[in-house]
């Protein structure tokens, strides 16, 4: 197997290397030259592979730091206030028909006429 084929197989094992090329950090030629000189030594390739792993985890680390700084008591208080405001708006916007008081109906006496 040629050195070029070995490099291709090495890159297939570590696809993180392709990200460096896509980001224009290194070219394939640069990576091939390192491979040609050092081979598959882990110590040499750690800087390429671990750097990509760290940059991939960076957004998750930022999110975790953001969540750690959140005061849940304040969040609960704001949610309760928002719920109260929504209830007030719902009460103001719902149409309720005014209630007409019911007049008690008593039976008219038989001997009573309209004008009496």
Image (spheres, helix red, strand yellow):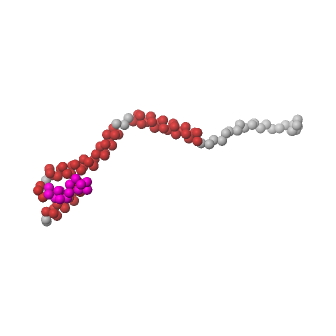
Q: Is residue 15 visible?
A: no
Quarter occupied by residue 90: top right
Residue 50 lies, in percent from the top left, at 21, 49
Q: Is residue 78 above or below residue 56?
A: above
Judged by its main secondary structure, the magenta piece is helix
State the residue lying farthest toward the front: 24
**Residue occupying image coordinates x 12% and y 58%:** 36
Residue 33 lies, in percent from the top left, at 14, 57
**Residue occupying image coordinates x 46% and y 38%:** 79
Residues in magenta, as a range = 21-34
* Residue 110: in magenta span: no
Residue 95 lies, in percent from the top left, at 62, 42
**Residue occupying image coordinates x 14% and y 51%:** 44
State the residue lying farthest toward the bottom: 1
Q: How many marks?
A: 0
**Residue occupying image coordinates x 14% and y 55%:** 34
**Quadrant the N terminus occupies:** bottom left
* Residue 28: in magenta span: yes
**Quadrant the C terminus occupies:** top right
38 left or right of 49? left
51 left or right of 76? left
Q: Is residue 59 visible?
A: yes
Quarter occupied by residue 19: bottom left
């Amino acid at each position: 197997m040629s050195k070029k084929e070995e490099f291709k197989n090495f890159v297939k094992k570590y696809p993180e290397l392709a990200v460096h090329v896509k980001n224009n950090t290194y070219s394939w030629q640069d990576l091939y030259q390192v491979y040609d000189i050092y081979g598959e030594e882990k110590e040499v390739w750690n800087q390429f592979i671990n750097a990509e792993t760290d940059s991939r985890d960076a957004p998750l680390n930022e999110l975790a730091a953001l969540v750690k700084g959140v005061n849940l008591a304040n969040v609960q208080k704001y949610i309760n206030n928002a719920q109260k405001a929504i209830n007030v708006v719902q009460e103001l916007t719902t149409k309720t028909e005014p209630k007409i008081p019911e007049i008690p109906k008593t039976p008219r006496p038989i001997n009573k006429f309209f004008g009496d």
